[in-house]
């Protein structure tokens, strides 16, 4: 099950579980669409994997399977 991390690793922008702007790689590194497209050019700085839209978890499933609260922020690795 996806962790659904709550923020962008570059800019620390909030990315709630229903956000259409969240992007992830196969290791679930999480970025906002702006950082993924404009700074990272669609490539994860951690693993070089492709960044794709993160699936959204249905609201009725969030109570039983909540999103992660762990924030990861690596601004220096993202050129910030």
Image: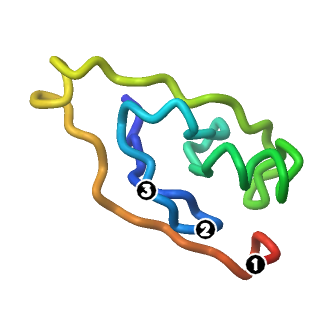
Query: Is the residue marked by circle 2 packed among few (<14), some (14-19), or many (20+) residues within 10 Å?
Result: some
Res. 48 mark = none
| Marks 1,2: beta carbons within 8 A | yes
Distance between the alpha carbons at the discs numbered 3 and 2: 9 Å
Name the residue at the right extreme.
41
Whether residue 62 is situated above or below residue 25 in the rendered picture: above
Which quadrant is home to the C terminus?
bottom right
* Circle nearer the N terminus (1, 2): 2
Q: Residue at x 62, y 74 (%)?
A: 74
8 relative position to 43: left or right: left
Whether residue 11 is situated above or below residue 36 in the rendered picture: below
Marker count (numbered): 3
Whether residue 3 is situated above or below residue 64 in the rendered picture: below
User: Of helix, strand and loop, which one carries label 2?
Assistant: loop
Distance between the alpha carbons at the discs numbered 1 and 2: 8 Å
Structure colour scheme: rainbow
User: Of helix, strand and loop, which one carries label 3?
Assistant: loop
Q: Residue at x 75, y 48 (%)?
A: 36
38 relative position to 63: left or right: right
Res. 11 mark = 2
* Circle nearer the N terminus (1, 3): 3
Name the spot of residue 24 as percent of width and height, x first: 61, 40
Pick the front one: 3 or 22 = 22
10 relative position to 77: left or right: left
Q: Which residue is mark 3?
A: 14
Name the spot of residue 27 as percent of width and height, x first: 60, 43
Name the spot of residue 6 as percent of width and height, x first: 39, 53
Query: Is the residue marked by circle 3 packed among few (<14), some (14-19), or many (20+) residues within 10 Å?
Result: some
| Marks 3,2: beta carbons within 8 A | no
Q: Which residue is mark 1?
A: 80
Which quadrant is home to the N terminus?
top left
């Amino acid at each position: 099950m996806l962790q659904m991390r709550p923020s962008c690793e570059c800019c620390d922008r909030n990315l709630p579980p229903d956000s259409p702007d969240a992007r992830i790689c196969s290791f679930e590194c999480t970025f906002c669409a702006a950082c993924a497209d404009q700074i990272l050019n669609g490539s994860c700085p951690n693993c070089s994997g492709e960044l794709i839209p993160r699936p959204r978890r249905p609201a009725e499933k969030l109570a039983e399977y909540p999103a992660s609260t762990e924030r990861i922020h690596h601004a220096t690795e993202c050129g910030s």
